[in-house]
Image (cartoon, rainbow, N blue to C red):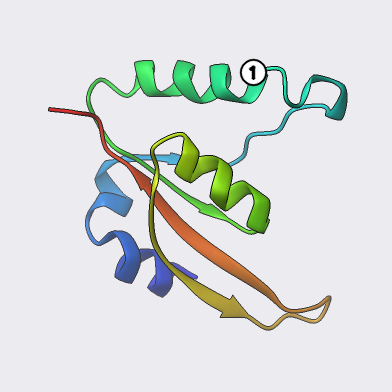
Amino acid sequence: MERFKKETFGDLAKTEWYLQRIGVHPYWQGKGVGTELIEYGRQRTDGHSIVLQAVEPSNVGYYEYLGFKNKGHIDVEALHGNFTVTGLLWQPLK
């Protein structure tokens, strides 16, 4: 995964903000709470980019809707099942 992160984001993976986890209780989904959380994070970056890795396909589309750019994916084989990790990048307007 570290190699994928480096190949996908280059030096940004070391210098920019990395969104580790975000979640919204099902009751609050679709009510703008997740968007507000992302916006709060954007305001705190002080002009830096945000990088993240998404596993759920529906989340990839959501992050793209919020302005993140799809930078590629990797298919992962694991003991509990195979999955795809997608790297996404948001960069503030300069």
Left or right? Give the position of 55 relative to 94.
right
Left or right? Give the position of 14 relative to 75.
left
Q: Residue at x 19, y 28 (%)?
A: 93
Looking at the image, which is closer to me, 21 or 89? Answer: 89
Mark 1: which amino acid? Gly
Quarter of the image containing the C terminus? top left
- Asked whether residue 19 appears in the rendered view, the answer is no
- Asked whether residue 62 appears in the rendered view, the answer is yes
Q: Residue at x 84, y 75 (%)?
A: 80
Q: Please tell me whether residue 50 is drawn above or below residue 38 in the rendered image.
A: below
Dividing the picture into quarters, in which one does residue 6 lie?
bottom left
Instruction: Give the residue pinned by disc 1.
Output: 32
Residue found farthest to the left? 94
Q: Please tell me whether residue 8 is drawn above or below residue 23 in the rendered image.
A: below
Q: Please tell me whether residue 39 is drawn above or below residue 19 in the rendered image.
A: above
Dividing the picture into quarters, in which one does residue 20 lie?
top right
SS at badge 1: loop
- Residue 8: x percent and y percent? 33, 65
- Residue 92: x percent and y percent? 24, 30
Crowd around label 1: few <14 · some 14–19 · many ≥20 (10 Å):
few
